[in-house]
Structure formats: structure tokens, C-alpha cells
Image (cartoon, rainbow, N blue to C red):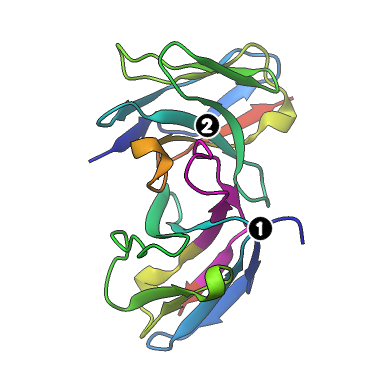
Amino acid sequence: GDSVTQMEGPVTLSEEAFLTINCTYTATGYPSLFWYVQYPGEGLQLLLKATKADDKGSNKGFEATYRKETTSFHLEKGSVQVSDSAVYFCALSDQGGRRALTFGSGTRLQVQP
Amino acid sequence: GAGVSQSPSNKVTEKGKDVELRCDPISGHTALYWYRQSLGQGLEFLIYFQGNSAPDKSGLPSDRFSAERTGGSVSTLTIQRTQQEDSAVYLCASSPGVGSNGELFFGEGSRLTVL
């Protein structure tokens, strides 16, 4: 079945540091890939997505590139801020979106001033 | 309201009691999902409703769990004879349905504590 594997957290960084959160997946067919973010006390919200190989999703300074050859969708940001502290979830949607999303276990990011 | 609404936000119950959790999706969204988020764990899929199709119940962990969606809108997740391992945050999400490229809109969750 489909699965998503994320690096374990917490990830602790100083403000303005470079961020990478690794995500790899297993799926049949050609999934769409997502990063969701959960800020403290809030519900999950979509951060970015990519629907086909080599697509790059980007939002709020975050980027992730859909790499079919390595089945990866790593999240990156060049300079993190304290306000980026949250839990980040990688997810995939298979079968043309006719099934529920499969999520990774989440990675907590803590950014210190 | 504009977003997905869940109630109650917090529920404390005793082992063996039944609980009902409610989800009011975004108006017009045909797809509705329930997930469970346990402490330190990721999101565990429970059940998925899409329009008038039979729901995908493949994620329900036991027959103590059930869900219904009335009139294609509000959904209720019922847990019978609750156990301590049922303690978690239960998340509801909705989406416009097939072809929406998978973006889900989540509520803030219902935190269930079973004593």
C-alpha cells in the first residue's frame, strides 16, 4: 500500500538557518504530493503541493521538488523564522484523488531566536 | 462558518462509555474525511465519504468505531465502549471532491481523553 516516510523530529534550528525536512514515499501510479503544516493551536493547512514529476511547489519561502527517480519530496527553506515553528506533514494522494490522503508521521520544527 | 467546524473541542470520558464527535464541513464540499492523531504519531486515516458513494471504511480500527454522514453534509463519528487507547485528537477534513487535486481543509480537531 501507499506510505510516506519523514525524518523524525524535533528539528531545532536557529533563526535564519537553512531547513531541510526529508520525505520519501511509496505508491502505485503517479501520486500528487503535499506538505501540510500545523501551527500550535491550529488545524492542519496546506503549505504546498506538486502534481507531477519535476514540479516544484512553493509557498511562504518553502519549496519542495517532486523527484520521481528518488521517490522524494523534501521540504526546504533558505532562512527560517521563529514563526515557522510548527509540525510539518508530508502526504500523498493516489488514484487521481479518489482516495484519502496518506500522511507521514510529521516532523516538529522548533526555531530559536 | 467559512471553515470546517468540529465539536466538542475537548471531551473527557470514562472507559466503557460511548462518545459522539461531530463535523460540519465547508458548504458545498462533497468529500469528508476523519483522521486520528495520537500523541507523537502521525495522522491515521479512519474513514472517507465521497458524495453518495459507499464510504471507504478501511481505516476504522475496530467495530467499536462507526461514522455516518447525513444529507451529504454533517458527519458524526461514534466510538462505543471507549478504551484508553482511543485517547487522541480526532480530525475532520473536507474537500470539493474528486478532481480537487487532493487539498483537504481541516478542522481544529476534537481532543478525546478516556480515563
Which residue is outermost to the right? B1
- Labelled disc at residue A35: 2
- Image x and y of residue B19, in percent: 48, 82
Q: Please say whether residue B72 is one of the residues in the magenta stretch.
A: no
Q: Kindly state the secondary structure of the residue where label 2 is placed.
A: strand
Above or below for B78 versus B25: below
Nearer to us of marks 1 and 2 is 1
Q: Residue at x 63, y 74 (%)?
A: B8
Q: Residue at x 32, y 19 (%)?
A: A71
Quick check: do tags 1 and 2 share a chain? no
Q: Magenta stretch?
A: B90-112
- Labelled disc at residue A48: none
Q: Quadrant of the N terminus of chain B?
A: bottom right
Q: Residue at x 51, y 80 (%)?
A: B20
- Image x and y of residue B53, in percent: 39, 62
Q: Nearer the viewer, residue B11 or B24?
A: B24
Looking at the rendered structure, the kind of residue marked 2 is: Trp
| Residue topped by disc 1 | B26
Q: Residue at x 46, y 39 (%)?
A: A106
Q: Nearer the viewer, residue A110 or A61?
A: A61
- Image x and y of residue B71, in percent: 55, 74
